[in-house]
Image (tube, helix red, strand yellow):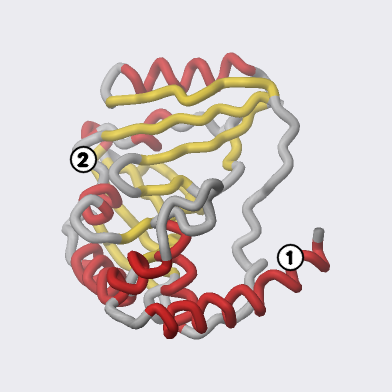
Amino acid sequence: MWVGHFKIFHENCVNLTYTRRYDVVDSIYPLTTYFSGNYMHISSLHLLSGREGEKKKFITAYSHDPRVVEIEGKGTDFFISHVKTRKTDRHTFTFYDPRLFFLRPVIHTDREDWLVGAWEKKYLQQVYRNWAKYFDVETVSIAREKVAEVFLPNLTPALTAKQKEALEVAAQMGYYDYPRGVYLENIAKKLGISRISLQERLHKAEGKILPRLIKTA
């Protein structure tokens, strides 16, 4: 199949409004998009990662945004949203082609990070041209690839809130990159805990996840 990787910034994105304000990564998997009158409605699954306090601030601010009709979820790990925007506001989904399909959630940090597939290259090229008329778009790549991964949101076992926070922040800061981009001391300082406590949380989290990944590999 053809795989397109794009990074996009646009001022009127409700999700970027708050990921740029708080230290949170919002990975969004769209559930449905439809038009009614002069409005576009988007329902999405949000998977949040970051420090617990930052995620709480994000959810509070997000839920009070006038474009957000409703959110529903438990805790700070995930929620489902219903967003309503005017057609004239031009969101990235205004130009989304249903002949594309998501290979993973759209990752929101300071930009939207899209990884989408299509059976024909022209659909990826067309959505890029539409986006480029109104948004700041970087095409990382459009290439024919064999897809090795898909989005499996329920793959990971239950972690405690502290274990999940430690794992997510470590990953965001580059602890699992090669070569390693950060030391445990830096991560512990950001979390406000000791190096030993961080090491213990990561060890327990990895002990839950790694055996499961090996068995499913």
x, y (%) of residue 125? 51, 16
Residue 44's place in the image compared with 133, above or below, is below
Is residue 60 found left or right of 205 in the rendered image? left
For disc 1, the marked residue is: 213
Q: Is the N terminus in the top left, top right, bottom left or bottom right quadrant?
A: top right
Which quarter of the picture shows residue 65?
bottom left
Q: Which numbered dot is residue 12?
A: 2
- Above or below: residue 31 compared with residue 129: below
Quarter assignment of residue 88: top left
- Picture residue at 41% right of the left edge, 56% below the top: 182
Give the image location of residue 158, x and y in percent. 59, 81
Image position of 162 with respect to 184: above or below:
below
**Residue 159 screen position, x and y as percent:** 55, 81
Q: Secondary structure at mark 1?
A: helix
- Marks 2,1: beta carbons within 8 A: no
Q: Which of the two discs, 2 and 1, labels the residue nearer the N terminus?
A: 2
Q: Quarter holding the C terminus?
A: bottom right
Q: Quadrant of residue 34?
A: top left
